[in-house]
Image: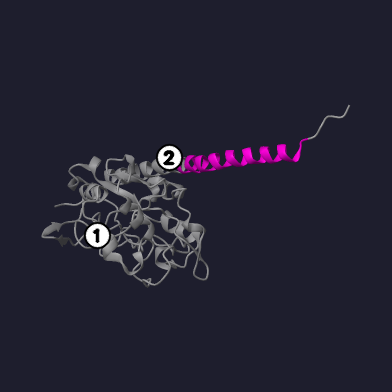
Amino acid sequence: MRSRGFTLIELLVVIAIIGMLLAVLIPALQIAKEQAAGAVCLNNLGGLSKAYYLYQEENNGKIVWATTGRYVDDPSNGNYPWVESPHDGNPDPSARVYTGHNSTVEEKKNGIRTGLLYPYAETVDLYHCPGDKRYIQPVGSRGRGAYRSYGTPATMMGEWMGGRTIEGVSIKGIEKFNELKTPGDKFIFIEENYTHGPEVPASAPFDVGYNANSWVMWLYGFDSWWDPLAPWHNDRSTLGYADGHAEKWNWRDERTVKFSKDRMWNGTREASAKQPGNPDLEYCTRAFPRRD
């Protein structure tokens, strides 16, 4: 006796049930994937923060510079970046060809390898968050988007070493590690979603090249962002601190996430950047390292 096959209605019911299950499972799997990427990112920034701490321990309290330019082994030049800008990998610093924003992923990794922090980290993977997919995007005639996911504050031997006055408050840069009175409360690494450098016109696409220079706050005052964050983990970010630990941060204000995703804000920069009463901005203001 032959067994009866499925009727069309039965097949449609099964397909409908499978569809409903997928509708429930796929978002859950996406969330789980982002959580896994967040765990890797937390480990990365913990490793970089420890490397940063080890560097200053072995160099009489001197810190690596929060710049991403060309390394020149000459004290009179004063350029000792934690990572270099992308280059061709020539072992002779004076002969390297720096490829800037129109660079391949390998050239970006070369810049990481010749930065002063790399001997204390020893793997380029620590510099990249798996949730950051910018490096897949084509850029220019031969390049790819940013690979390095993390930036360092402008006050850590970066763009603001000369100091800056905001709303009557003098902001001074850090030159020695012992100038950080509470290193466990000050972040030295942050996920950032900004890739324009000074040589790139504002009209250019955002995901170009690499996260040039340092991470800056307070474009229009203490109630304003400057460079955007990167909420790659369900609207969360990871920060690395000067004492060697890292933490996940849930951004509480929807304006923080919108600003980070919009970035240059299509001509409405000031209106989007100024966010009075934003608790995320208030926290970053307290945790931004500086020598007041």
Question: Which residue type carries mark 1?
Answer: Lys
Query: Which dot, 2 or 1, sits closer to the camera?
Result: 1
Residue 77 at least partly seen:
no
- Decide: few, some or many residues near mark 2? Use Cα within 10 Å; few <14, some 14-19, many ≥20: some
Q: Are marks 2 and 1 in contact (CB under 8 Å)?
A: no
Q: Which mark is residue 39?
A: 2
Choose between 201 and 240: the one closer to the eye. Answer: 201
Task: Return the x and y of residue 32 as percentages of the image width and height.
Answer: 48, 39
Q: Gap between marks 2 and 1, in whole Å?
A: 31 Å
Q: Which region of the structure is painted magenta?
A: 6-35
Residue at x-position 49% and y-position 59%:
105
In the image, farthest residue toward the front: 9
Task: Return the x and y of residue 151 as percentages of the image width and height.
Answer: 34, 54
Residue at x-position 62% and y-position 38%:
17
Q: Which residue is mark 1?
A: 274
SS at mark 1?
Answer: loop
